[in-house]
Structures are given as C-alpha cells and as structure tokens.
Image (spheres, grey):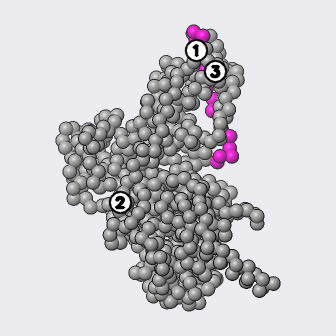
Amino acid sequence: MRGNRRNTRIWRLAVAALTAMSCCIGLAACASPLGLPVSGLVQTLAPDEQEAQRVYTNPEGPAQDAQPEGIVQGFYDAMPAGVQSDGYRVAQQFLTSSAAGGWNGDASAVIYTGTPDFRRRANTMSAPQGAESSLIVEVSLQVVGTLDAHGVYTPDDSAKTSKIDYTLIKTKGQWRISSLENGVVVSSADFEQIFRQVSVYQVSSSGSQLVPDVRWLSWRNWRARAVGEVLSRASDWLAGAVEQQDMHGVAITADSVPIHNGTAVVTLNQAMGSLPNEVRAMLVHRIRLTLGDGNTQYSLKITGDGVDYSDADENVRLDVNVPKVNVYTLTGGHVVSLASSSPLRVGEAYGFDDAEGLAFSASVGGAVLRGDDVVECLTKDGASCGEMFDGTPMRSITAGFSGEVWAVSADGRNLYVRQGSKETELSMPWLASDSSVTAVTVSPEGSRLAVAVSGETMSGVVVTGVVRNDADTVTGLARTAATVSVAKNVSLLTFYDDLSLVYIAVPQNANGQQEGYRQTAPGPAKTQCLPDDRVVALAAGQISQYRRLAVLDDLGIVRSVSGSLDGSWSIADSQVTALGAQ
C-alpha cells in the first residue's frame, strides 16, 4: 500500500511538472500594473489609466402613465448614470419636486447582485394634500456591499435579502416617488463602471511611508471628492497608524477639479495660507499623489485664496514605492530563493522537514515555524539562532516590513512581532471574545494589517492599522478594524501588491474545493483560480523580475502566476516543505 501511494505521488508530480493550469478571472482593481523593477531595492508603480475601461449609460425618463413598479424600476435604471455622468438629472425626474430637492444621491450606496423584485403594497398613512392616492413599492434585493459618505466599501452577506421601501404619490394622473432614503442603489455589474477606486494617500505614524486609504468615489466628480477626503480624516481603522494633521478649516471652494492643458486645477479657500509650511507642503503632496494615482510627477495647480502653492511640495521626498520582495522556500534542508528562473540556494537549514511556515530575508534572516509549532530563528545563512517568542507555540508566521517576523498565537488571540532582537506581544482590542485569528499578512509599506478571523461574532477578513514610532518600531495596533471580506474559513492570505489582497478559504467538508479570492482592500471580491492540488502556503514577491503570486501545494510544488493574476500557473520549485516571502 505504501509503495502504491509513493508511485501515485510520483506520477502526480510528473503530471504537475508538465501541466500549467489556465485561470479564468478578470483583471483585479489595482493602482498600478506590475512590470520590471526600475532600479535597486524599490519598484515604482506606474498608474493605470482607468477611464479607458468605462461604459456610459443613457437612461430615459419616466414614461407617460407608468405604473408605480415601473417608476421605481426606471429610477433604478437611471441612478447609475447619475453617479457616473449626469448628476442625477434623469433620476430626479422619477421623484416629486420636493423629494428631488431633498434627496442626496452621493450620500451612500447599496450594491446588489441579481435582479431586484418590485412589489407594491398599501400605504397605511393618508395621502398628502393634493395627491390623488399613495402607495409603497417594496424592492427586495441581494445586497453584497455598501459605501458610506466617504466612499469606504463594506461587504455584506449576499445570502441575506434586503428590502427597501419607496413611497409614491399620484398627482395629475402620474406616479412619482415622494419619499426615499438618501444614497443610490446600484448593481454589482455597474459598480466599477460608475465608481472609481481612489487611493487617498495618508502619511504613516512614523512619517516615513505613504499609506493608501482606498475609497470608491463617483466618476462624475471624483477629483473634487478626492480632494475633500484628503482634507478630511483617514478611515477609522487607520486611526493611530497614520498622521492626522489639523487642516485649520482648509476646504475646496469649487464642486469640480477641471483639467486645463493636462493640469488638474484645485482651488482652496484662504485657510490654506494659515497652515504651517511643513503641513501645507505635505497636503499639496498628498493631493498630487491622490489625484495622480501615486505619481509624484502629476501636473497640479493648487491655489488658496488666489495664492499659488503648486510647488509647495518640491522638497517632499516621500514616494509611493513597493519594496522589492523575494520569495523563498525550504528545499531539502536549504533555504532557496526563487528570485530568478533558476532556484538559488542562499542558506542551509537542516532539520526542518516538517516545517509549517517560513519568513525569510537574505539580508537579516528570518524564522521557520517548526512542526511542533515553535518558531525557530534563522540567520541569513539559514542556520538556527534559537527559539523566538520564548518558545511559545504559534499558529502561523509571516514576513513583515523590513525583515520583521509576525506570528499568530496558538489560540489565535494575540499577535507577536520580532524586529531585530526586539519581540513585542500585541493585543487586538477589536477582536470578538468568541473569535480567533487564523492568519495575518502585512502590507508592503508596513502600516496595514490584514487578518483572517474565524468565529461566531466575527468571521472573514479584516484590516487594521499598525502603529509605529519615528524609528518604524511597531508599538501597537489601531483600536478598530474594518471588515473587507465575509468569506468563511479563510486560512491563507497575502498582499499581492500595495492595494490587492489574495486569500484562500479551506473547504468545509472533505469533498469541498478550496476557494480563492482577490480584491482591492476594501472593495468587491473576485474569484481567484487555484491549481487543482490543495494549497498549503501562499506568498507574493519578485520571481524572474516580475511581481508574482506563488502557492505551495500539498505535493511540495511551488507554482506562480504574474501580472493581473490571469493566465497560466508555472512551476517554480518542487519538493518544498515551506514557502514564504521576505
């Protein structure tokens, strides 16, 4: 029996070595396409021009003598164009003049999947004076996410049916909506056509990095809204992890940011002149990067009460760079780098044939999670340098910012981080008492943490901020977290780049298949195709000069896929016991 199993495994390995699996997934939303590194240890990402992918809609107003259900359905058909281009000119035609004057479509958004169901029911309240009759149209739909007034996306459980009521009155023989909540309701198919992903760049608490704070803003006026968000506060889950400067009442004075001869023109009020010079310089820099999708050379004219501050940030050196990160494996007692097409041994690490995890950097070393759940320190040559975290058993480990090693406690209630010789235990004040962490990953700039959580009260993937001092030492975590995925049983996750998360959920039964997802965090999730064999480890980094996603399966084979994560999986190594990134 043992010989048959060995022969079967050898046969599967041989087949795997000759086969690449094609994926069938769409392009992930990302601030920038990934290609060859520009130079040195950092990779500058060129912004993606998103406007070329847009499809415009041209809705019609209400038909004569339309029934109540038709009026509400027509309103639904018109809302996407309001967000995208026409400022709700057509959508307001389905409302009474009073309702149209009080309704704010930009206040929030509900995103649904499938086909809404429109049904009328009686209105128990008497019709208002001047109305011939009144009733309610109830809309049932499957909600998958919401946006708040600041464009922050929150996923919802798509299995839940939500109901939204619209009160209609009939005047002069025509039905119109007289009462409704602020905000729009749009389909998931329309969402990325009418809302633009914008990174509102914040400054980390250490002052050394720029942190993308992802928002989804209406295409119609996204630049003006983006400037408003730069002037506002960061997302709650980043509180403490990024600087919060007092803007002294600075505000944008126009409802748009026009483009003149390729230059964005931002007009601010006179409070701009009262800012301290260093605060004003950083504000201009953040606006430039936010409107330019991270491009420091983005052409910007910015004035405050007529004074030109366009060059205020000329001495600010913070860039949006993603550090070059190599992918490493343990193969036959060796630490192996997959930075090129040929795996390269960089250290000897014998005695870890049952390793459950690896975090490694060629410059400082790292750690391996042994089969007994103890984290073993590794030098940059792969040799053991003792046990980490006082030998406390850990559930998983991952590499962090600049050679850090992060670990999840065996009970999933605490996190640990080692920076050099300093080890810190971190509590998660937002973690529910009946929930635990199964895995963690650190963003490239080190100020964001994505955490897989399992439990009754909390389940899915959440993000929170990492608080650092001016020496970039971790001092704690933000006191709140934001849910970015409601997927159950997530066991593996990694930041693919500065904006995108990739994560894998384990099957809930013996016959189930692993489910892979990717998404701009926070943002809607998309399916990620996986190899046929069960994935046991996940990492992202540079392989053969390109940013690639790498997975280790239960046969000991590392496969990788690059770019938009479309295309074929290629084999990078075999007979591997652990896989990790720098």
Q: Position of residue 376 (x, y in %)?
A: 54, 84
Q: Is residue 273 above or below residue 255?
A: below
Residue extending farthest right: 1
Q: Main secondary structure of the magenta part?
A: strand
Secondary structure at badge 3 equals helix
For label 1, the crowd category at 10 Å Cα-Cα, with few meaning under 14, some 14 to 19 and many 20 or more, is few
Using the image as rendered, state which of residue 362 and residue 458 is in the foreground.
362
Q: Is residue 230 visible?
A: yes
Amino acid type assigned to the residue bearing label 1 in the image: Gln
Q: Nearer the viewer, mark 2 or mark 1?
A: 1
Q: Between marks 2 and 1, how big is the CA–CA gap? A: 54 Å
Q: Which residue is mark 1?
A: 64
For label 3, the crowd category at 10 Å Cα-Cα, with few meaning under 14, some 14 to 19 and many 20 or more, is many
Rendered image: mark on residue 150 = none
Amino acid type assigned to the residue bearing label 3 in the image: Pro
- Which residues are drawn in magenta? 157-174
Q: Is residue 240 above or below residue 96?
A: below
Using the image as rendered, state which of residue 502 and residue 377 is in the foreground.
502
Mark positioned earlier in the residue sequence (3 or 2): 3
For label 2, the crowd category at 10 Å Cα-Cα, with few meaning under 14, some 14 to 19 and many 20 or more, is many
Quadrant for residue 517, please give it.
bottom right
Q: Position of residue 498 (x, y in %)?
A: 44, 60
Q: Is residue 423 visible?
A: no
Q: Is residue 202 left or right of residue 125?
A: left
Rendered image: mark on residue 68 = 3
Q: Which residue is mark 2?
A: 320
What number of labels is visible?
A: 3
